[in-house]
Image (spheres, helix red, strand yellow):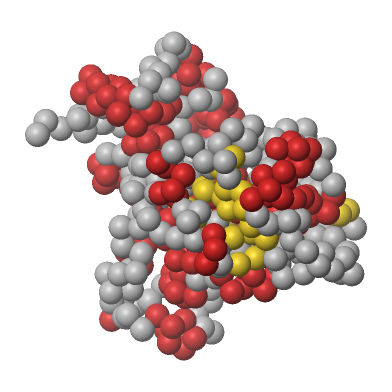
């Protein structure tokens, strides 16, 4: 088999050499790691004295959710909201198999279903499975023919009225309605405040991962905070380790870096990543295979795409960003990523800049990872859990994981660095820029991108910008 890309050399060698020789600046480090200041906003999810459930449900609501973990997470929140709008009983959502990651994990494989149902017991009725008389309503049933109970053409960001006019009659006539596809099918605007707050309640309170995901995530966080000695590195008793070692050394701070540089992302961007002609042909073929012409080769040049901030940051570029912000080579970095396109060859430059970089494989044994091995959604769930317990979260490129964690950490007032993609794209195009010029531009361009709360604007996602809908100004 021909290799589909040539091993890329560093594309910003001048900056890289300077970054590798950077000195630690003590005052700057303390500012970097300082917790986010109180911004005066508090989570608010509605009145404690919520109205009781209606005595009669209009019927059963099924939804079929595609995408990865975080797209499905947002779809679950929307499903609860739509069930509330329709006064319907929600069937635990069905998670479709992602064509890219091929993960068949169900809702109950990922999320604590009993916790989910208990938190929402006063908001909507929820059932795990349909009663016997509706067991025919399955994914396979809807795949074989046009069915009167399937809602196939729900508009993207549909209004509450659309559901009342188009789905409620189906519920009332048949006792059940199945919406497929359902991702991004509820508007972020012109909804009652109680519906908006319910979406946030689902996202930030009801959706917690199953116990084994939380336990493994806690163990990884502990090992990042309290690095074990060589003799303890292979320990598999992570629950005992988590409780026994606390307090024996000062906890260390760490950054979670979500490095979204998989083949899917690289192909979708249509950017050039230095892998030569073979890489360009391979990514073009991948675009055609996965999206069948819906994602085309870009009409813009690579330079135009980068100057517009439309190219995902490579591992090398992310490393230069973090170094310019002031993170030194003693920084403990956790790499949250499923598969990096190009593997270790792509990551090697980032590892040179941050030799203490860790990931799931380096922190946990194969025995500990047996329940999540090869399951993209469970792997992402562990990364999400670690990301919510880090001192700082950085996402290399916008995407569903970025959006979900930015919103969740905003809700909890936690520091999150959002790369200025346009600025960085333009800086990396300048091959004559010095390290001091690059560093100054990066620091100035990210002063207000470190977790400062931003109010949601029309059409923006409530899951990325939870204020003011789900937060109040104290």
Residue drawn 21% across and 23% down? Answer: 278
Between 75 and 271, which is closer to the camera in this rendering? 75
Image quarter of the N terminus: top left
Name the side, left or right, on which 57 lies relative to 324. Answer: right
Q: Position of residue 216 (x, y in %)?
A: 43, 72
Residue 169 seen in the figure: yes
Q: Position of residue 332 (x, y in %)?
A: 45, 59
Name the side, left or right, on which 243 lies relative to 441. Answer: left
Residue drawn 70% across and 38% down? Answer: 166
Quarter of the image for residue 319 reads top left
Name the side, left or right, on which 404 lies relative to 23. Answer: right
Residue drawn 74% across and 61% down? Answer: 57
Q: Position of residue 215 (x, y in %)?
A: 47, 75
What count of labels does the image hold?
0
Between 28 and 230, which is closer to the camera in this rendering? 230
Name the side, left or right, on which 34 lies relative to 313. Answer: right
Q: Height in image: 252 above or below 413?
A: below
Q: Height in image: 134 above or below 99?
A: below
Residue 199 seen in the figure: no
Residue drawn 48% across and 56% down? Answer: 136
Q: Position of residue 456 (x, y in %)?
A: 76, 40
């Amino acid at each position: 088999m021909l290799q589909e890309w040539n091993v890329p050399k560093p594309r910003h060698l001048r900056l890289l050499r300077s970054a590798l020789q950077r000195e630690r600046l003590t005052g700057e480090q303390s500012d970097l790691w300082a917790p986010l200041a109180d911004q005066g906003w508090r989570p608010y999810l509605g009145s404690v004295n919520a109205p009781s459930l209606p005595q009669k449900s209009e019927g059963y609501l099924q939804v079929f959710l595609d995408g990865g973990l975080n797209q499905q997470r947002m779809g679950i929140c929307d499903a609860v909201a739509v069930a509330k709008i329709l006064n319907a009983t929600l069937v635990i959502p069905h998670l479709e198999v992602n064509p890219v990651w091929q993960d068949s994990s169900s809702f109950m494989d990922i999320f604590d279903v009993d916790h989910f149902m208990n938190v929402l017991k006063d908001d909507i009725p929820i059932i795990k499975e349909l009663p016997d008389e509706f067991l025919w309503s399955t994914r396979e049933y809807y795949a074989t023919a046009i069915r009167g109970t399937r809602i196939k053409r729900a508009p993207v960001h549909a209004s509450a009225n659309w559901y009342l006019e188009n789905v409620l009659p189906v519920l009332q006539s048949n006792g059940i309605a199945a919406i497929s596809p359902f991702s991004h099918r509820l508007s972020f605007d012109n909804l009652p405040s109680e519906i908006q707050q319910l979406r946030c309640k689902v996202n930030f309170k009801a959706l917690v991962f199953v116990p084994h995901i939380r336990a493994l995530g806690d163990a990884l966080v502990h090992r990042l905070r309290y690095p074990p000695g060589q003799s303890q590195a292979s320990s598999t008793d992570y629950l005992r380790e988590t409780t026994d070692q606390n307090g024996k050394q000062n906890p260390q701070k760490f950054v979670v870096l979500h490095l979204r540089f998989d083949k899917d992302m690289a192909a979708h961007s249509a950017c050039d990543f230095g892998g030569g002609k073979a890489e360009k042909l391979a990514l073009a073929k991948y675009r055609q295979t996965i999206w069948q012409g819906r994602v085309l080769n870009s009409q813009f040049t690579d330079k135009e795409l980068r100057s517009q901030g439309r190219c995902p940051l490579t591992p090398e570029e992310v490393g230069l960003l973090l170094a310019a912000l002031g993170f030194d080579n003693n920084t403990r970095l956790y790499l949250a990523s499923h598969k990096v396109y190009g593997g270790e060859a792509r990551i090697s430059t980032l590892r040179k800049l941050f030799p203490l970089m860790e990931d799931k494989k380096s922190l946990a044994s194969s025995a500990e990872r047996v329940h999540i091995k090869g399951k993209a959604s469970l792997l992402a769930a562990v990364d999400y859990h670690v990301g919510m317990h880090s001192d700082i979260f950085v996402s290399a490129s916008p995407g569903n994981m970025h959006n979900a964690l930015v919103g969740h950490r905003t809700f909890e007032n936690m520091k999150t660095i959002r790369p200025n993609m346009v600025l960085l794209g333009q800086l990396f195009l300048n091959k004559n820029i010095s390290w001091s010029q690059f560093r100054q531009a990066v620091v100035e361009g990210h002063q207000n991108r470190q977790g400062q709360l931003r109010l949601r604007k029309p059409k923006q996602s409530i899951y990325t910008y939870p204020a003011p809908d789900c937060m109040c100004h104290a």
